[in-house]
């Protein structure tokens, strides 16, 4: 499994001529990095003077967002493997026999299913990654000021993960024949990118104001 590899081993696999892991797994790693950085800011905050002097409401918010970021981190790491597995299913479908009309029909059904499964993984990544923005916002607003840039890097990494995941959704969508399905999926993707970019800029403005 990818999550069990050393970083150097993962990067070696990523740079090889194998079709997976690829951009989808790299996007998931970027999201996991963003979540880890967010957790770090919170862990450098809890128990410190700034935290102890904060209201009970803010302390509770910090703890809640730490738990949320931690849980998302686990999900993003799992999606690294799921993305590679999903693409492998597409490759298997493409290799199915196509000598007879029946074989061709079965192959087409399997290919369409494969592409839908393959796009569901990066779509889940993009949607879940967008949810991390609330945690990064809290980290930037109330976190340890000495780690404010880490919150900024988390926001930058997160938007890269979102847009990277969406690219993988789009390339799989290009092979889907259901036009209505494609239209709805693209609308959803464009909204995530637009909303994510807006939240990233808001966080970066906050971060830069504290430097």
Image: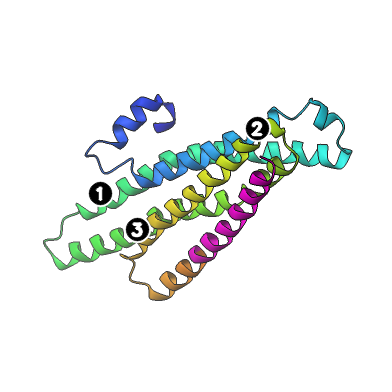
Question: Is residue 174 shown in magenta?
Answer: no
Give the magenta range: 189-211
Q: Main secondary structure of the magenta part?
A: helix
| Residue drawn at 36 percent across, 43 percent down | 84
Q: Which label sits on residue 26?
A: none
State how far apart marks 2 and 1 are (Cα): 46 Å
Label 1 crowding class (10 Å Cα cut-off): few <14, some 14-19, many 20+? few
Q: Residue furthest left?
A: 99
Label 3 crowding class (10 Å Cα cut-off): few <14, some 14-19, many 20+? many
SS at circle 3: helix
Residue corresponding to mark 1: 92
Residue corresponding to mark 2: 147
State how far apart marks 3 and 2 are (Cα): 41 Å
Cβ–Cβ under 8 Å for marks 3 and 2: no
Callout in the foreground (1, 3): 3
The tag earlier along the polypeptide, 1 or 3, is 1
The quarter of the displayed image where residue 141 is located: top right
Q: Which label sits on residue 115?
A: 3
Q: Residue furthest bottom?
A: 180
Residue 108 position in % (x across, y down):
26, 64
């Amino acid at each position: 499994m990818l999550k069990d590899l050393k970083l150097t081993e993962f990067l070696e696999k990523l740079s090889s001529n194998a079709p997976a892991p690829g951009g989808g797994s790299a996007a998931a790693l970027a999201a996991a990095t963003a979540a880890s950085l967010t957790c770090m800011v919170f862990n450098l905050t809890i128990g410190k003077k700034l935290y102890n002097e904060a209201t009970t409401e803010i302390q509770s918010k910090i703890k809640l967002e730490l738990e949320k970021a931690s849980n998302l981190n686990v999900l993003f790491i799992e999606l690294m493997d799921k993305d590679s597995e999903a693409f492998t299913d597409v490759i298997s479908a493409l290799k199915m026999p196509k000598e007879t009309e029946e074989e061709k029909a079965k192959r087409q059904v399997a290919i369409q299913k494969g592409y839908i499964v393959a796009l569901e993984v990066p779509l889940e990544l993009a949607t879940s990654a967008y949810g991390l923005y609330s945690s990064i916002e809290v980290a930037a607003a109330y976190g340890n000021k000495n780690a404010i840039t880490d919150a900024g890097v988390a926001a930058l990494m997160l938007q890269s993960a979102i847009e990277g995941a969406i690219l993988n959704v789009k390339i799989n969508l290009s092979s889907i024949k259901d036009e209505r399905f494609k239209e709805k999926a693209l609308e959803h993707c464009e909204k995530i990118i637009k909303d994510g970019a807006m939240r990233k800029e808001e966080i970066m403005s906050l971060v830069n104001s504290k430097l």
